[in-house]
Structures are given as structure tokens and as C-alpha cells.
Image (cartoon, helix red, strand yellow):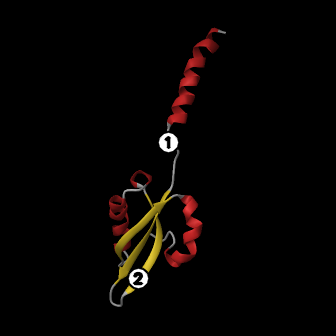
Amino acid sequence: MRLKTLCSPIWIGLTLALLALPAQAECYVDYKAKQDNPLQLAYGVAQVSDDICGNTGAEAAELAPRLAANGWTLLKVLSSFGPEGLDERKASAGDFFLRY
């Protein structure tokens, strides 16, 4: 009985600590990019780190090198959103949906 009494506050504390942790979210951005010679424009959707979600400058800094590795130049990060925004953007992004 004494062990139960000692463990109760510990379990309550652990449970509260776990509930206080932020939920693991997924962060996505939609963007515009270009290639030169010949000029090509693209609209795409990419996943970025959760900790920079909503910081357009940091999102651009993370995404630009990924695009540049395949000859694309990031023009603009348009917006950031969670997984609930993926379906409505999938058709518009086409081949650039979660490619980079």
C-alpha cells in the first residue's frame, strides 16, 4: 500500500509532463521557383522543419539549397501550413508536390 502512495504523485507528475509537451506537427510550405535557359516557372509544395514553421526567412533558407541542387532558384515562399492543407495543393503542385 505504501508503494502505491509513493508512486501516485510520480505518475501524476509524469503524466502532466507528457501532456505539456508540444504535439509533433508537420510543417509544409508552398513556393514558386524558376530555372533559366529556357525559362521555366514552377509552383511546388515541400516539407520543412517544424521548428521554423511560420518563419518565412528560415523556411526559404532551408528550401533554397534543395531546389538549387537540381538547378532551380527559389523565388518566394508563399505560405506555411500543416498536413490539412496538402490535399488542396496537390493538383496545383503536380510533379513538384513534396519533391524537394
Dot 1 falls on a residue whose secondary structure is loop
Instruction: Name the residue: 36% across, 90% down.
Output: 38
Instruction: Name the residue: 55% across, 35% down.
Output: 19
Instruction: Name the residue: 58% across, 69% down.
Output: 88
In the figure, 16 relative to 51: above or below? Answer: above
In the figure, 15 relative to 70: above or below? Answer: above
Q: Quadrant of residue 42?
A: bottom left
For mark 2, what is the residue?
Answer: 41
Instruction: Name the residue: 36% across, 77% down.
Output: 72
For mark 1, what is the residue?
Answer: 22
Provide residue 47's location: percent of width, then percent of height: 47, 62
Residue type highlighted by circle 2 = Leu
In the figure, 34 relative to 89: above or below? Answer: below
Give the position of the N terminus as an image quadrant: top right
How far apart marks 2 and 1 lie (CA) works out to 37 Å
- Classed neighbour count for the residue bearing mark 2: other residues with Cα under 10 Å, few (<14), some (14–19), many (≥20): few
Residue type highlighted by circle 1 = Pro
Residue furthest out toward the right:
1
Give yes or no for contact between labels 2 and 1 (Cβ–Cβ under 8 Å). Answer: no
Residue furthest out toward the bottom:
38
Position of 92 with respect to 53 (left or right) is right
Q: Quadrant of residue 16?
A: top right
Provide residue 15's location: percent of width, then percent of height: 57, 29
Query: Which label number is shown at residue 7?
Result: none
Give the position of the C terminus as an image quadrant: bottom left
Q: Quadrant of residue 90?
A: bottom right
Of label 2 and label 1, which has the lower sequence position? 1
Dot 2 falls on a residue whose secondary structure is strand
